[in-house]
Image: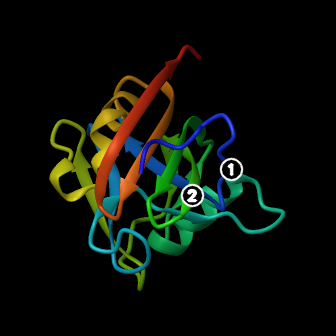
């Protein structure tokens, strides 16, 4: 499958990701997903946006559900557009927060992992993450990423950096 026509592309699923960064410790709160899309992979907490819910409210809710932590004052840093060869098309709003309440707990959905910003486990993450995640977490950059996947294999990638 060639890259989709991104001009006319429409997602079938709207979702979010939240990355909580402890700047003083130079760590980010990641999860090892236990179920669903990407089970077994390391990622940020997140999930599908409910009808009538804003993407920011979804990112906060999903982080609470997956880790028992409430992100405060998150900032949207980017958008991910994913097209899968099997037909799934997914739009993900990416948030970063440096304030939170609560201590992360393991849930049925996720295992919490405080991870050094200098040692992100890209080999255990989705292939697209290495093209944008460090810049968002460390440099606080804003971006738009468009990716074509065949199951776990990334076929194409296009990342555009946006001046905030």
Identity of the residue furthest to the bottom in this view: 108
Kindly tell me whether residue 17 is visible in this rendering.
yes
Q: Is residue 32 above or below residue 18?
A: below
In terms of sequence position, does the residue under pointer 2 or pointer 1 come before the other?
Answer: 1
Residue displayed at 21% across by 45% down: 120
Which residue is tagged 1? 10
Can you say whether 115 is above or below 142 in the image?
below
Of 108 and 122, the residue lying toward us = 122
Residue 141 visible, this angle = no
Residue at image point 47% right, 72% down: 66
The foreground one among 41 and 70 is: 41
Is residue 55 placed above or below 6 in the rendered structure? below
Identify the residue shown where x is 44% and y is 48%.
19
Residue 55 horizontal side relative to residue 30, left or right = right
In the image, residue 80 lies at what x, y percent?
A: 52, 43
Above/below status of 7 relative to 83 = above
Left or right relative to 98: residue 43: left
* Residue 154 x %, y %: 31, 49
Q: Nearer the viewer, residue 60 or 43?
A: 43
Q: Position of 122 compared to 98: left or right?
A: left
Mark 1 is surrounded, within 10 Å at the Cα level, by few (under 14), some (14 to 19) or many (20 or more) other residues, namely few
117 on left or right of 147? left
Q: Are marks 2 and 1 in contact (CB under 8 Å)?
A: yes
Task: Using the image as rendered, state which of residue 34 and residue 131 is in the foreground.
Answer: 131
**What's the CA distance linking mark 2 and mark 1?**
7 Å
Q: Residue at x 39, y 67 (%)?
A: 104
Q: Quadrant of the C terminus?
A: top right
State the mark number for residue 144.
none
Residue projecting furthest to the front: 1
Asked where in the image residue 151 lies, by quadrant, the reply is: bottom left
Q: Position of residue 142 (x, y in %)?
A: 51, 26
- Name the residue tied to disc 2: 89
């Amino acid at each position: 499958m060639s890259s989709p026509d991104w001009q006319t592309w429409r997602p079938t699923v709207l979702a979010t990701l939240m990355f909580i960064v402890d700047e003083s410790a130079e760590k980010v709160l990641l999860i090892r997903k236990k179920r669903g899309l990407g089970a077994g992979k390391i990622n940020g907490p997140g999930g599908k946006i409910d009808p009538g819910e804003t993407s920011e409210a979804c990112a906060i809710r999903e982080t609470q559900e997956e880790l028992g932590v409430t992100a405060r004052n998150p900032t949207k840093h980017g958008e991910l557009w994913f097209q899968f060869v099997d037909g799934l098309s997914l739009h993900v709003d990416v948030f970063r927060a440096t304030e939170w309440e609560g201590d992360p707990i393991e849930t049925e959905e996720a295992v919490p992992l405080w991870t050094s910003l200098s040692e992100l486990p890209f080999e255990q993450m989705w292939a697209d993450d290495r093209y944008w995640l460090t810049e968002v977490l460390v440099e606080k950059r804003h971006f738009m990423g468009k990716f074509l996947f065949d199951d776990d294999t990334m076929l194409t990638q296009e990342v555009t950096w946006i001046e905030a």
